[in-house]
Amino acid sequence: MAARFGPGDPVLVRAAEKPGHVRTPEYVKGKTGRVEEVLGVFEDPEILAYGGSGPPEEPLYKVSFRQIDLWEGYAGSANDALYVDIYEHWLEPAREEAR
Amino acid sequence: MTRVHDLGGSSDAGPIDRSQHDIEDWERLADAVTIVLDKKGVKTTDEHRRAIESLAPELYEKLGYYERWIAATELLLVEKGILTPKEIDAKATELEEI
């Protein structure tokens, strides 16, 4: 499966409430970050968690977030970043000016 | 709604307990059994995580790290029809009597 996003692309994490096992932490949902790297294509752990075989495989991205975008009243440097590995079905394109 | 295990960034989670303790034998055993079951293809890491997350929130909060692993392993072995709760309880009772 071809990766929909590439390094540098701004992405918005879906704010979806998906029941069951998910690999996307709550604190990045609805937040905008940037793709740092396409880590590869893997079986979906959200399906594997229920004993399924996991296909179709999907791209996994290393996404960076600015700490000031994640935490209200963040007192550290505006350059501080946090990285989360996120599967493609959690991401949608974001506008550049959104972050 | 945030589930019990997904605590990152929540302000009411309290401070992190950073105290250490020596690893006990039962913890090594819990780790070993889990790894062997994975290697033998009985269960996967993703299933293990899902099972831990499915524990009742009160139980999740109460149990320690490897206690959660044991609870998850028990849940998955029963789910897959390898052991029954009755067999597990009988063995636990037997061990308590030693």
Image: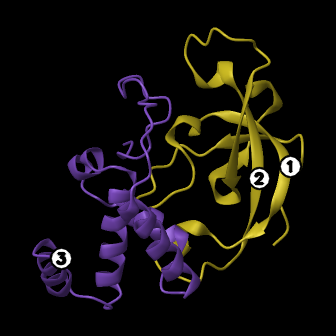
Q: Quadrant of residue B6?
A: top left
The answer to whether residue A26 is above or below residue A17 is above
Tell me, yes or no, if residue A20 can be seen here: no
> Amino acid type of disc 1?
Glu
Q: Are labels 1 and 2 on one chain?
A: yes
Tell me, yes or no, if residue A89 can be seen here: yes
Instruction: Using the image as rendered, state which of residue B20 and residue A17 is in the foreground.
Output: B20
Does residue A99 appear left or right of residue B77 in this picture?
right
- First of labels 1, 2 by sequence position: 1
Q: Are labels 2 and 3 on one chain?
A: no
Does residue A84 appear left or right of residue B78 in this picture?
right
Residue at numbered disc 1: A37
Question: Could you say whether the residue bearing mark 2 is in a helix, strand or loop?
Answer: strand
Q: CA distance from mark 1 to mark 2?
A: 6 Å
Q: CA distance from mark 2 to mark 3?
A: 47 Å
Q: Quadrant of residue B71?
A: bottom left
Mark 3 vs mark 1: in front: 3
Instruction: Please name the residue shown 39% across and 42% down the image.
Output: B2
Instruction: Please name the residue shown 33% across and 91% down the image.
Output: B82
Give the image location of residue B94, x and y in percent: 13, 81
Give the image location of residue B30, x and y in percent: 41, 67
Give the image location of residue A5, x and y in percent: 83, 53
Residue at numbered disc 2: A61
Residue at numbered disc 3: B95
Question: Which chain can be seen in yellow?
Answer: A
